[in-house]
Amino acid sequence: MAKGQFLGVATCTVALIGGTLMTGGAATAAPVDTTINSSAFGNTFAASVPTDRTLPSKAEVTAAKKDPAALKAMVSDIEDLIGDSTRELTDAEASAANDQDAYETTSQTLAKRNEAAAAASTEAAKATKYYDSVKKQVGQLASDLYRNGGVNPGITSLVNDSEHNDVLYKAATMNTLATNRSNTLTTAQQAASLWADWQNYADAAETAATEAADANETALQAAERTRTAYADRVTEQKKLRSELIDQLAYLRDTERADEAKRITAMEDAQREEALQTELATAPAEPAAQEPAEEPQALAAAPEAVPDEATGNTSLAPQTKTTKPSQAPVAAQAPATDPKPVAASTPSPVKAAPREPANTKTSEPKPAAPAASNSGPTTAQKKAAAHKRAQEQAAAKKARSEAAQAAANKKATAAAERRAQAAADRRAQQKAAADKKAREKAAAAKRAKEKAAAEAAQSSSGSSKESAIAWALGTASDNSKGYVFGANGPNSYDCSSFAQRAFAKSGISLPRTSSQQYFAGGTKVPLSQLKRGDLVFSTSNGGASFYHVAIYLGGGQVVHARNPSAGISTTPLSWVNNIYSYGVRY
């Protein structure tokens, strides 16, 4: 969608003698007579001769010179012919300038729509990448189910887990698995919808940009056509004017130079009269109304695309059993059973030396008590076993509670993440809406402050002195000129000239004459103009404007006039088709 550019053609540089800036009255376009006319001196003219008018023949001029009444009538007719011809030239200039402004406006629209299309294309590509990442997650989910015969492998592994027999733990884990799967599918649906929205929006943006490019090309062709027609008319007008002045000099027996001065003075008086009429008949308020804003080519953009989807979508349970670092009840090592002590076998008693025989029977000594068994009793063994069972049950319960707590924590964290993501999206949307509202309020505030500043400065042109100084300096520089659509630094058209001048005073003006009238400022009648105000030309009663000039005070303006006249200072009355209200920034 390349945008065509142009600054003018060489034919626009032909010389235009005095009088190309006509009266300030509204110009009425008339059809052009294409019949070739021959002058009394043998020259021929086509488009430059006004409708229903013919050039006097040599015989008519000769005959009129012999009759005072006929002579006076012919002089008046030739003067009218000059006026009609130059007014039609003014109409051609207005058409060229209007079409140029239309081209500038469509160029601005094209630039905005190209920018919007590029941004939409970038976001659509991001939506595609996001959608692909989500589809990959769904594919992993489907693959896991397929490999396990449609059964969630996470559930199978969980049911067969012998380490986690706690019902609540398994239920929480199964709920988490189901939630993860549901979230994956929901995200996939949202991603698909978002992708479709952005693809449609990008297509619409591309279509809007294409339409803008077509409109821009059409405007370019119209501008080139009317600009060429204007240049052709300038050339023929120069020839026709010269021929008619020669006829006047012949009829009135005057020098050609004197006759040219007389015609110029007469045209100046007509311009001034027209200006005074405009001042006297100006309405109490400007009739020009700001044109309706261009309808939006695009609806609101879809929701912003999130970052690429990440995360593990495996259906296998991800929660690992965490062994507590310290069980609630400390597990003590079971008491060691005392080993039974074997009964000691008494050592054989050595026989004592025999004493002399005693006929008396010796009394027997009491027997030594039998060695006792030191091992635990049955009751003690039962008590130790019961204690060990209690400790093992407590440790198992602690592990189960820890696993349940971990599962609950993970499920809660997942729910919190989802809630946070939803809250973040809502916050982003609200932030975007709030930002737009703030920008709108700030723009309104800036406009109000600008209007207040302009009102404070309206009593004096001092704030525009930098602009005026630059404009006058440029007008006096013979290396600077006028070219349709030019933006400097060596060539300007009327609106780019005013735009660049006001920038020197820190005032930002839009690009075209119509935009500069409607953009802001205070509308002031011509009778109340102050130094630094802008004045405008219109060919349709103020529906649009095709020329702008900077008022200098004292009935003078400085402006970029046309390709022939260039940039110069002129009387206010030289502003063609002047509108009854100016603008004070």
Image (cartoon, rainbow, N blue to C red):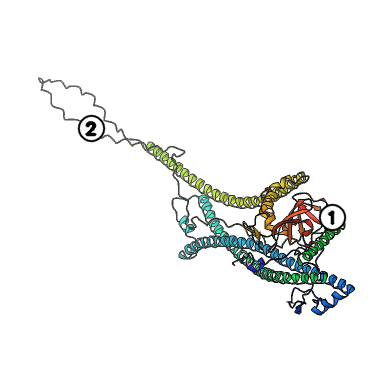
Classify 207 as above or below 455.
below
Of labels 2 and 1, earlier in sequence is 1
Residue 50, percent across and down?
A: 79, 73
Which amino acid type corresponds to the residue marked 2 in the rendered image? Ser
| Element type at mark 1 | loop
Residue 161, percent across and down?
A: 45, 54
Front residue of 274 and 198: 274
Could you tell me which residue is drawn at 78 percent across and 67 percent down?
Answer: 87
Asked if residue 379 can be seen in this view, the reply is yes
Foreground tag (2 vs 1): 1
Mark 1: few, some, or many residues within 10 Å (few <14, many ≥20)?
A: few
Q: Is residue 228 left or right of residue 139?
A: right
Mark 2: few, some, or many residues within 10 Å (few <14, many ≥20)?
A: few
Which quarter of the rendering shows the N terminus?
Answer: bottom right
Could you tell me which residue is drawn at 72 percent across and 59 percent down?
Answer: 513
Name the residue beneath numbered marker 1: 285
Could you tell me which residue is drawn at 13 percent across and 20 percent down?
Answer: 359
Mark number, residue 362 = none
Measure the alpha-carbon separation of dots 2 and 1.
Answer: 136 Å
Q: Is residue 346 left or right of residue 1?
A: left
Front residue of 510 and 7: 7
Res. 121 image quadrant = bottom right
Res. 541 image quadrant = bottom right
Q: Is residue 282 left or right of residue 178?
A: right
| Element type at mark 2 | loop
Residue 429, percent across and down?
A: 64, 53
Mark number, residue 344 = 2
Residue 61, percent across and down?
A: 82, 76
Front residue of 36 and 69: 69
Which amino acid type corresponds to the residue marked 1 in the rendered image? Glu
